[in-house]
Image: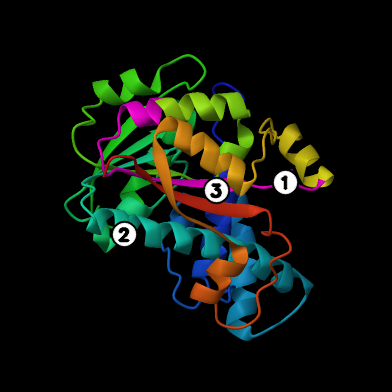
Amino acid sequence: MEAGRASRTAMMVAYMRALADAGATHVPEFHDPTARVFLNAKWSRKLAKIEQQVQRGREGASLAFARVAADMMALRTSAIDAAVRDAVAAGSRQVVILGAGLDGRAWRMKDLEGTRVFEVDHPATQAVKREHLGALPPRIADVTYVPIDFERQSLEATLAAAAHDDAIPTCWIWEGVVMYLTREVVRTTLAQVASRSAVGSTLIVNYHTTMRHWLVRLVLRLMSEPVRSKSSPEEMADDLGVAGFDVLEDSGGADWARRFAAGPVDLRVGRIMRIAVARRAGA
């Protein structure tokens, strides 16, 4: 991501969540009314067109394409939400969202009541998000914004300065970020996460098993957010293990569809996505 500019992929992800919330998905229980709040004028117009087609029952190429994107994001989000609920139920009273983007969990997940959520991200992206906070419903969790330049600042020191408590269990959410980092940076970040994770902490990592289609990679590179890494489940488990985390579960799109979807889901776009849920060793 270019210095001083908000993440473009964060806006795209919010748009896909908004599509799903508007009904363009096969995941009937998915709801995220916060997503549309963050959309700029361009993406709001796109959403309005698809929403109109959904309401009128007009099936067509544009709606079919939108459903694929919406399903992918609704499934990924639902799987991570479920893991967050389990972590909070197991005792995590802090949630740290690494590369939070335009995440709306602190405003929509009732399970986060009584927790403290740390949203860690680049200042430019956080600035865009904070411009829209007045349009959101009341917060469910206590939110602390933690601006950071990941290339120049220490995650450990920045979280410590923000009053993150490394003596109590934390639920870490690392969604839609790992694939944009080199594996070396991923390992370094894992070590820093581990240093601030009390025994019993949960780490939820979304990653890709293969590089994306060349055309998608080109578009992302032109957006200054190039894809840089991939990992097999075994490689991810190894990296997590070195950092002191034991993998509890590693799942993919087909698993999420069986759990959350109703009706056929086109998984071709999301087949490379996986989520590992790990617990800090020693629990």
Q: Residue at x 66, y 80 (%)?
A: 264
The quarter of the displayed image where residue 98 is located: top left
Extreme-front residue of the structure: 282
**Whether residue 131 is visible:** no
Please say which color scheme the image uses: rainbow
Q: As drawn, is 155 to the left or to the right of 166?
A: right
Residue 113: x and y, percent? Answer: 20, 56
**Magenta region: which residues?**
192-213
Q: Nearer the viewer, residue 257 or 103?
A: 257
Q: Earlier in the sequence, mark 3 or mark 1?
A: 3
Question: What amino acid type should be assigned to the residue bearing mark 1?
Answer: Thr
- Which residue position is annotated with label 3? 40
Give the secondary structure at mark 1: loop
Give me the C-alpha separation between circle 1 and circle 2. 28 Å
Q: Earlier in the sequence, mark 2 or mark 3?
A: 3
Q: Which mark is residue 283?
A: none
Q: Residues within 10 Å of mark 3 (few under 14, many from 20)?
A: few
Residue 69: x and y, percent? Answer: 65, 62
Q: Residue at x 61, y 59 (%)?
A: 45
Residue 260: x and y, percent? Answer: 49, 74
Residue 226: x and y, percent? Answer: 70, 33
Judge whether 153 appears above or below 49 on screen.
above
Question: What amino acid type should be assigned to the residue bearing mark 3?
Answer: Asn
**Whether residue 7 is visible:** yes
Q: The N terminus appears in which quarter of the rendering?
A: top right
- Which residue position is annotated with label 2? 86
Please check the rendered image and state whether residue 252 is part of the magenta-colored stretch, yes or no: no
Extreme-top residue of the structure: 152
- Which residue position is annotated with label 1? 210
Q: Residue at x 54, y 65 (%)?
A: 75
